[in-house]
């Protein structure tokens, strides 16, 4: 076995996003779980290397699974970001939000819940044909999020 060990990854903040969402479309229990769809109304993202707006028209397709002590939401959001200089970037964002039933009820009721009290992490992937942002196509990213009454806020980090 090698005497060397792999270097641990380093996280570098890419941007903070705030995404406004409409009330959920509740499809009910489907074969894969309780399905909720949150239409994306728009938003903003701001970082040192990249900033702009989140275009309306995407959505977050969630599957909800309940256990005796928590509610787990499998997040699958897809949307388009437009940079301050006009580049379009397609984002696929998968993740998990895990909270107690009481916390979820408070969130659904429009109440803010301290993000330190629940788990919310994602893995965004980026796709663009704009040469100025080609570097994003190869970024491995992770994000931590929080749910506010009318929006989702998350910080996206590049793994380096």
Image (cartoon, rainbow, N blue to C red):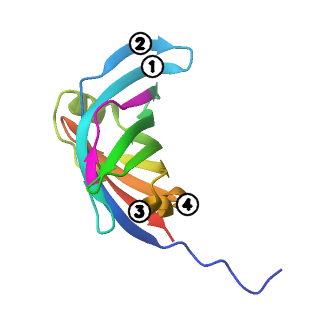
Q: Is residue 17 above or below residue 159?
A: above
The quadrant in which residue 3 appears is bottom right
- Point out which mark residue 28 bears: 2
What secondary structure is found at the residue carrying circle 2?
Answer: strand
Residue 13 screen position, x and y as percent: 36, 66
Circles 2 and 1, Cβ within 8 Å, touching? The answer is yes
Mark 3 surroundings within 10 Å by alpha-carbon count, few (fewer than 14), some (14 through 19), many (20 or more): many
Residue furthest bottom as drawn = 3
Residue positioned 41% across, 62% down in the render = 157
Q: Residue under circle 1?
A: 34
Q: Residue under circle 3?
A: 157
Q: Is residue 51 above or below residue 74?
A: below
Q: Marks 3 and 2, Cα distance to the nearest angstrom?
A: 34 Å
Indicate left or right for 13 with 46 as reference.
right
Q: Residue under circle 4?
A: 138
Residue 103 screen position, x and y as percent: 27, 36
């Amino acid at each position: 076995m090698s005497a060397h060990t792999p270097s641990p990854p380093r996280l570098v903040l890419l941007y903070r996003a705030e995404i406004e969402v409409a009330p959920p479309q509740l499809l009910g229990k489907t074969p894969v779980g309780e399905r909720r769809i949150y239409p994306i109304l728009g938003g903003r993202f701001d970082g040192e290397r990249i900033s702009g707006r989140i275009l309306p028209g995407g959505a977050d397709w969630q599957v909800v699974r309940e256990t005796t002590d928590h509610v787990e939401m499998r997040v699958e959001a897809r949307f388009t970001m437009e940079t301050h200089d006009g580049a379009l970037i397609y984002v696929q964002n998968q993740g998990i939000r895990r909270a107690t039933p009481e916390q979820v009820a408070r969130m659904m009721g429009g109440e803010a819940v301290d993000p330190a009290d629940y788990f919310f992490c994602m893995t965004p992937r980026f796709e663009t044909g704009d040469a100025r942002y080609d570097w994003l196509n190869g970024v491995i990213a992770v994000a931590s999020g929080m749910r506010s009454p009318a929006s989702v806020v998350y910080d996206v980090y590049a793994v380096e």
